[in-house]
Amino acid sequence: MIERYSLPEMALIWSEENKLALWKEIEALALEAWADLGVVPAHAAAAVRAAPDVDPDAWKEREAVTSHDLAAFVDVLADGVAIGGEWIHYGLTSSDVLDTAGGVMLRDAADLLLTRLADLFAVVKRRALENRDVPMIGRTHGMWAEPMPFGLKLATWAFEIGRDYDRMRHARDTVAVGKISGAVGTYAHTPPEVEAYVCGSLGLGTEPASSQITHRDRHAEFLSTIAIVGASLERFVTEIRNLQRSELGEASEAFGDRQKGSSSMPHKRNPIASENITGIARLLRGYALVGMENVALWHERDISHSSAERIALPDATGLLYFALVRVSNLIDGLDVDTARMAENLEATRGLVYSQAVLLALAEKGHSRDEAYRIVQRNAMATWDEGGSLQARLAADPECDLTNEELAASFSTERAFANTGVVFERLEELEL
């Protein structure tokens, strides 16, 4: 995990100290299960639980000899147990410990991500409701389309975050499994009762049919979900980047009193947080591909996935966690320039109300094509020659709308008449 993008609570989950503590806990739980079955003396399980934690430096020193991380751990743990150390790792294979511990770490990482998704949802929902009546230009293809409330734009984000939350919750349950079933999943040397006890004590489900490992389609789903959430964040910040452009200036990232936007141009106020999130989203999509590549292993297992997921899993969860916190802060402090939105809307010279006029003409009895041509002709003249669309239509003898009917078409009240239903739905949505 890169320190620059690592926050303490997520980094702790993936720390060597936490991983080694989980390995020790799994070894102790397995012995407790064996003791309950009358195979292992009870004092052995108690001795392992009471043993000192494995020191990361001693573990690495031993691994330099064994060239096997779990075997090195078992050696160091056994050295710290005076009586009963010979029972450590009884009936287990390395992946029983590694993948079960992995299930705990992935579950805990997902829980942190869910917490931050809920925080982001609350921020976006609040800001959407705050801006439900703020008019701005809606744009399609980067071009003026129709008026819309700024809050509606934010509401689409809030509902998407809600879907991301549901995806993450499902992916969390998918990866929160362990296995204690032996080298090829046959329970040849360890009965299912041991697995049930260990996984149950850790709050994990069990892989119903494992090989030597828990299957990596689970991890691929989790990493894909992380990538989807990252894509959502990228959608939000891409919009902020566009709205902050000098030509638009409708919304912008907060800017500190002592902040510098450029080392050389004092006037700059760049959307650096949004651009940072865009880059992180690209990485998250890459890690999703790693997850897909790790699904197909040879026979019951090889370790081609191991080196990849040692990087992908901590980095993906850590980067998304960082991104969620940053986007929450960004949107919470987003500067919304309602005056500039109004200026930009006025600068369209009424062109964004063209569909309302089209429909009003159709209601007057014009064919759709005829109505379209009347509005389009005047709209193109407004583009090319200036003036306002409303004034041109009022002067067009083929446009038989009254001044009152025209005025009604050129109003945000008409455009926003039905947007309330979206905000009613949003008010009802809770995570």
Image (cartoon, rainbow, N blue to C red):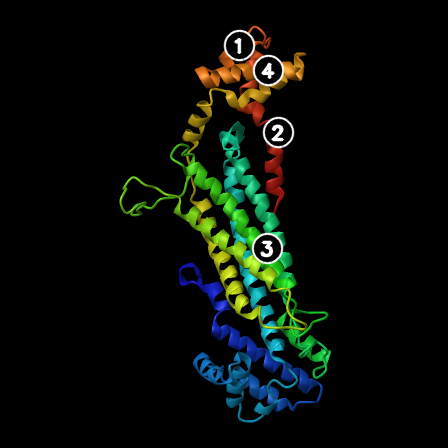
Distance between the alpha carbons at the discs numbered 1 and 2: 27 Å
Q: Which residue is mark 4?
A: 373
Q: Which mark is residue 225?
A: 3
The one of 66 and 431 positioned closer to us in this rendering:
66
Distance between the alpha carbons at the discs numbered 3 and 2: 33 Å
**Tag 4: residue type?**
Arg
- Which structural element holds mark 4? helix
Between label 4 and label 3, give the one nearer the viewer. 4
**Tag 1: residue type?**
Ala
Between label 4 and label 1, give the one nearer the viewer. 4
Choose the circle earlier in sequence order: 1 or 2.
Answer: 1
Q: Residue furthest front?
A: 298
- Which structural element holds mark 1? helix
Residue 235: % across, % down: 52, 44
Choose the circle earlier in sequence order: 4 or 2.
Answer: 4
**Tag 3: residue type?**
Thr
Q: Is residue 324 visible?
A: no
Q: Which residue is mark 2?
A: 418
Choose the circle earlier in sequence order: 4 or 1.
Answer: 4
**Left or right: 12 as drawn, with respect to 422:** left
- Circles 1 and 2, Cβ within 8 Å, touching? The answer is no
Choose the circle earlier in sequence order: 3 or 2.
Answer: 3
Residue drawn at (44%, 83%), measured in percent from left and top?
A: 61
Relative height, residue 196 to residue 361 (above, below): below
Q: Residues within 10 Å of mark 2 (few under 14, many from 20)?
A: few
Between label 1 and label 2, give the one nearer the viewer. 1
- Circles 4 and 3, Cβ within 8 Å, touching? The answer is no
Q: Which mark is residue 394?
A: 1
